[in-house]
Image: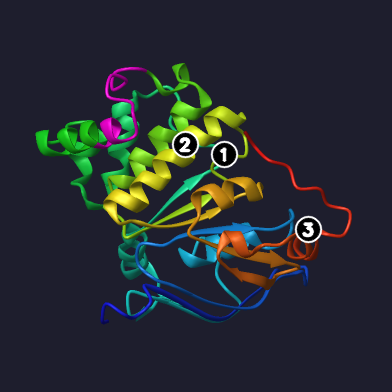
């Protein structure tokens, strides 16, 4: 793969669920390294299905997914685990081990590449603990290592989840509605750290978001889905009022999250 090639190339991506529901209808997309792609659309538009097909949490029905020059559409087993090390993911509900410490939660991001028994006994080597401390500092939680995860606020827990994902040293970070359960101020705090990773660490980010205002502020590019189809792909500032109504419906009103 040359530097001009897309890091991620998706062609004709389709997903039909067993009940016959067509969640994705022939999505084509190319993403270059270092982009911050925000995916918007109504609930049920296919955003979560789309992003989960990329790291194969959901198996596509049709089409191809090429990542870093490799077709990963149907990889299995060890090869799929290797792919998922390069494509990390954070979720809306954080998915932390609530009774474990912040440091332990972050270290679990390295489980795939760690020795099984020492990691199960929480006997991590010093370099791993230093790496975890570095990532906690990067997301603004340098003094939280010994705190239990359930003692943190929602925004802090999401930042722990980001640090955990960084333990994989990923090339791509997928964020599935990462701020949907957070208040506006905390949402901006989390988005700020994601933006920092994209700008300073060069990590490619794909994030599902509800609010167009967040997409405009943090994204370098916006993909809009409607009924499983791509209806917009371009710069955030190119979404006019007419395009907004096409994406969200004629009666939709744009809400700014402050």
Report if residue 146 lies within the magenta region: yes
Q: Residues within 10 Å of mark 1 (few under 14, many from 20)?
A: many
Q: Residue 195, percent across and down?
A: 41, 47
Q: Which residue is mark 2?
A: 190
**Is disc 3 in contact with disc 2, using a CB cutoff of under 8 Å?**
no
In this view, which residue lies farthest toward the right?
A: 251
Circle 1 or circle 3, nearest the eye:
3
> Alpha carbon of mark 3 to alpha carbon of mark 2: how far?
25 Å
Label 1 or label 2, whichever comes before in sequence order: 1
Q: Residue 24, percent across and down?
A: 67, 72
Q: Residue 211, percent across and down?
A: 65, 46
Numbered range of the magenta stretch: 135-147
Q: Residue 135, percent across and down?
A: 27, 37
**Is disc 1 in contact with disc 2, using a CB cutoff of under 8 Å?**
yes
Above or below 118: residue 151: above
Q: Residue at x 45, y 29 (%)?
A: 157
Q: Nearer the viewer, residue 133 or 57?
A: 133
Label 3 or label 2, whichever comes before in sequence order: 2
Tag 1's secondary structure? loop
Label 1 or label 3, whichever comes before in sequence order: 1
| Image quarter of residue 170 | bottom left
Q: Residues within 10 Å of mark 2 (few under 14, many from 20)?
A: many
**Is disc 1 in contact with disc 3, using a CB cutoff of under 8 Å?**
no
Q: Nearer the viewer, residue 48 or 235?
A: 235
Q: Which residue is mark 1?
A: 179
Q: Quadrant for the C terminus, please.
A: top right
Left or right, 109 with reference to 239: left
> Alpha carbon of mark 1 to alpha carbon of mark 2: how far?
7 Å
Q: Residue at x 55, y 65 (%)?
A: 235
**For the stretch drawn in magenta, what is the main secondary structure?**
loop
In the picture, the disc for residue 248 is: 3
Q: Residues within 10 Å of mark 3 (few under 14, many from 20)?
A: some
């Amino acid at each position: 793969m040359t530097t001009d090639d897309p890091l991620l190339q998706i062609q004709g991506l389709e997903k039909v669920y067993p009940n016959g529901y067509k969640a994705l209808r022939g999505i084509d997309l190319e993403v270059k390294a270092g982009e911050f792609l925000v995916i918007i659309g109504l609930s049920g538009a296919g955003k979560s299905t789309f992003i989960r097909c990329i790291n194969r949490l959901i198996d596509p029905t049709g089409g191809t997914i090429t990542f870093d020059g490799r077709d990963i559409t149907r990889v299995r087993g060890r090869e799929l685990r290797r792919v998922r090390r390069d494509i990390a993911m954070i979720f809306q509900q954080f998915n932390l081990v609530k009774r474990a410490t912040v440091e332990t939660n972050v270290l679990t991001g390295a489980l795939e590449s760690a020795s099984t028994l020492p990691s199960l006994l929480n006997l991590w080597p010093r370099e791993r603990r230093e790496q975890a401390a570095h990532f906690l500092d990067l997301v603004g939680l340098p003094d939280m290592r010994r705190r239990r995860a359930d003692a943190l606020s929602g925004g802090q827990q999401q930042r722990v989840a980001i640090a955990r994902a960084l333990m994989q040293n990923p090339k791509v970070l997928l964020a599935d509605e990462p701020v949907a359960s957070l208040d506006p101020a905390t949402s901006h705090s989390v988005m700020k750290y994601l933006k920092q990773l994209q700008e300073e660490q060069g990590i490619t980010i794909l994030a599902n978001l509800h609010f167009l205002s967040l997409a405009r502020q943090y994204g370098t590019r916006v993909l809009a889905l409607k009924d499983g189809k791509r209806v917009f792909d371009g710069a955030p500032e190119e979404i006019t009022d007419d395009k907004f109504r096409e994406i969200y419906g004629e009666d939709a009103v744009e809400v700014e999250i402050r």
